[in-house]
Amino acid sequence: MAENETENVQHKFWDFKKYKEHEWFRFLTLLLLLIVAAYIFSHYLVSKTDRRAGYEYAKLDKEQLQQLNRIYFGNEEPTLQEQGSPTSDTNEVVDTNKDGQNPSADAQNHLQVDTTKCYRAVDYIQTVFNNKVDSGQLGQILQYLRPAKHLEAIGFLANIRLLVKSYFWLTGPEVYFEIIFWSWFGVIASLLFNLGVVARNRTTDLTNDHSQFDSSEIPYQFAKLWYAPLATLAIVLGYNYFNDQNIVDISSSKGVIVFAFIGGFYSARLIALLDRLKEVLLPNNSTSDLPVQKPADAEMLSNTKITLELDDTITPEDTRNDIAEIGLGSALVTLQDDVNGETITAERDGEDQSSSYIVRSIKPGKYSITATWSKEVNGAPVNLKAVQSEEIKSSDQNIAITMKKAEEEG
């Protein structure tokens, strides 16, 4: 009897479609705590066993470079007689010109290599970063600066990436584990946010189907925990390709973490981005390998995308922000054929708060597109509506619909 109960519990644990709302919330909370514990423990353990882990890249900003310029080119500098530091190794290079005379004072300043300034520059860098710069890298920097001319030293310091001690793994292969962890955090944060939106809407609009918890979506939501880290890793690894499109500055250390979290939070949009990139990376220039379509399907167009946007006249600003936070994912979007009157309902494309919709297959022609959205915002009902006529004549066509307040609201 006890074995049967244990089997039933295990079966229900993996059968997400049988989860109730509070059970799914409890599962996500426990999963988040487990991942956070694994994240903290792994960082603590690796930092104790591997000194190479726990670094991030940093560059000197403009103010810091200005201070280094003052160190090298400042007017108030000690004379050679005053530079008696045991670490100072001042070498004065004196040359003569073609006439056999000593060069001018300015020329001597360019020829002179003052290693005291090198030590001052390195000490300044250590002070700025609270002695967290890798000591091995500092030794290499000092070795380069000692024979370098002043302008050459400033140019070198302006472009070098410093290895600074950090709690995060942002250098070396460990950065990929950091990406996986933060994409998981983003996915779970998104799922918890959606649960909160459903619970809030249900208390104010009991008749709205979109405000009810639907356990049939749980397997789809759980799958995000697996494909979101992989998709994020693929984009980070292909950063050199995306760099020209200015998606995000993931070349900076903290930028990787931010991008991983956002990629997990909006994982559906990440997949949509990869889906669009397939036309660039894997263009289909030949129809020889395509399956032969039936004549009945030859005229059908695919992937007509509709994006709902808020009209600028929606005021006050706090209401507009609340609507944007809730999202237009619960809107009803229909397309009516102007010729035969056939009506097609568009599907939501992405997260619950997404404002994008898609029609997988549609005949070319002129359609009347209607979008309606009703919610209670700040205790007051808000009704948005849009009616727009569009001609659909190609696949992957993008249509923008502007949502305005319904006329009965004024």
Image: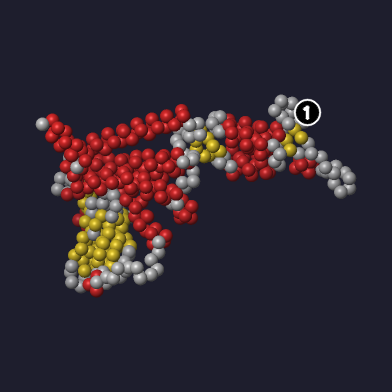
**Amino acid on which the number 1 mark rests in the picture:** Gln
Q: Please provide percent x and percent y for residue 189.
A: 31, 40
Q: Mark 1 packing: few (<14 Cα in 10 Å), some, or many (20+)?
A: few
Residue sitting nearer the eye, 269 or 356: 269
Q: Does any portion of residue 74 appear in the rendered image?
A: no
Q: Residue furthest left?
A: 1
**Residue at image location 45% in from the left, 35% down from the top:** 168
Q: Is residue 100 left or right of residue 148?
A: right
Question: How many marks on residues?
Answer: 1
- Local secondary structure at mark 1: loop
Q: Position of residue 403 (x, y in %)?
A: 28, 57
Q: Is residue 29 visible?
A: yes
Residue 46 is situated, as x and y percent measured from the top left of the image, at 44, 31
| Image quarter (top left, top right, bottom left or bottom right) of the C terminus | bottom left
For the residue pair 312 and 322, the one nearer the viewer reads as 322
Reading the image, the residue beneath label 1 is: 81
Q: Quadrant of the N terminus?
A: top left
Looking at the picture, the colour scheme in use is secondary structure
Of 382 and 332, the residue lying toward us? 332
Residue pictured at 22% horizontal, 47% vertical = 217
Q: Residue 49 appears at what percent x and percent y?
A: 46, 29
Horizontally, is 67 left or right of 310 in the view? right
In this rendering, is residue 208 above or below 287?
above
Q: Residue at x 53, y 39 (%)?
A: 58
At 42% from the left and 50% from the top, the residue drawn is 235
